[in-house]
Amino acid sequence: MTYDILVQTLQENSNKQFDKFNSKIVNSGVQTIGCTVPFVRKLAKNFSVAEVEDFPLHQYFEVDLLRGIVVSTSKRPFEEKSTHLLQFAETIENWAVCDCSTVKVSKSERSQYFDFFVSLLPSEKPFVCRYGVVNLMSNYLDEEHIDQVFDALATITQWGHYYVDMGVAWLVATAMAKCRDKTVAYMENEGKQALNKFTYNKALQKMRESYRVSPDDKQWTYTLKIQ
């Protein structure tokens, strides 16, 4: 499928009302067509990494999304795939492309990918940082890695960027559901210094909104809010 046929296929399967709704949520400077993520995922199965990396960047949101999905789901060894992931991460300009392109890490490559995603957090590019954050959240919120994940948050340099702050808040709130005791300790201690005020309070808010956090723990979050 050529690029022109891809765009034509996207346009033929677009929905104007969905596009109007979705474009506001995505908040991207890139033109949207109006296709759902499941449809783009289905189309992505027809392309190779080499093909999508030749497509124009930031002409259409759905094409950028398709590229991320193809790269992140490609079956390649870590040494090769991580190079393409980094190149992709450097192009991300909105949260939706970022969050829909996470990697499902295999057991045999968990150590390598952990170091790779951690290395993205200090980036001066906010969405490179967020890409590292959401991949850590998707793959490493377990007792083996949680302390290292929290330590890695201290390396972030782009505090104050809304999508970095919200990504970290999301990670911490999810950690509360998966590694409760260590997350409580983090929020009562080093988290107060490592996170900025907005992110810290947003993490508490997201815990209260989660159905996976107990009523007692939700009540506990009110005692920690930074004024």
Image (cartoon, grey):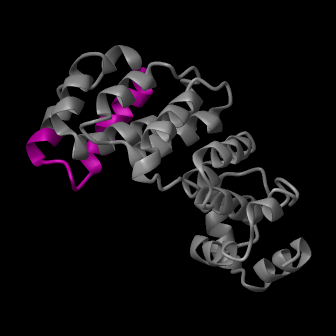
Q: Is residue 201 visible?
A: yes
Residue at 39% over, 51% down = 107
Dividing the picture into quarters, in which one does residue 187 lie?
A: top left
Q: Quadrant of the C terminus?
A: top left
- Residue 40 sits above or below residue 105 on the image: below
Q: Who is closer to the viewer here, 119 or 158?
A: 119
From the top left corner, tell me how far across and down residue 190 is, in percent: 30, 16
Q: Is residue 222 visible?
A: no
Dividing the picture into quarters, in which one does residue 189 lie?
A: top left
> Which residues make up the magenta segment?
195-218
From the top left corner, tell me how far across and down residue 134 is, in percent: 48, 44
Using residue 185 as the reference point, say whether residue 93 is left or right of it: right
Using residue 40 as the reference point, say whether residue 172 is left or right of it: left
In the image as oriented, which residue stretches furthest toward the bottom?
A: 12
Dividing the picture into quarters, in which one does residue 101 lie?
A: bottom right
Q: Who is closer to the viewer here, 5 or 20?
A: 5
Q: Quadrant of the N terminus?
A: bottom right
Look at the image and say whether residue 13 sits in the magenta stretch.
Answer: no
From the top left corner, tell me how far across and down residue 103 is, in percent: 53, 53
Instruction: Kindly report the secondary structure that dominates the magenta region of the rendered protein.
Output: helix
In the image as oriented, which residue stretches furthest toward the left?
A: 216
Residue at 40% over, 37% down = 169
- Residue 187 sits above or below residue 59 on the image: above
Residue at 88% over, 75% down = 2
From the top left corner, tell me how far across and down residue 42 is, in percent: 62, 78
- Residue 9 sits above or below residue 208 on the image: below
Look at the image and say whether residue 202 sits in the magenta stretch.
Answer: yes
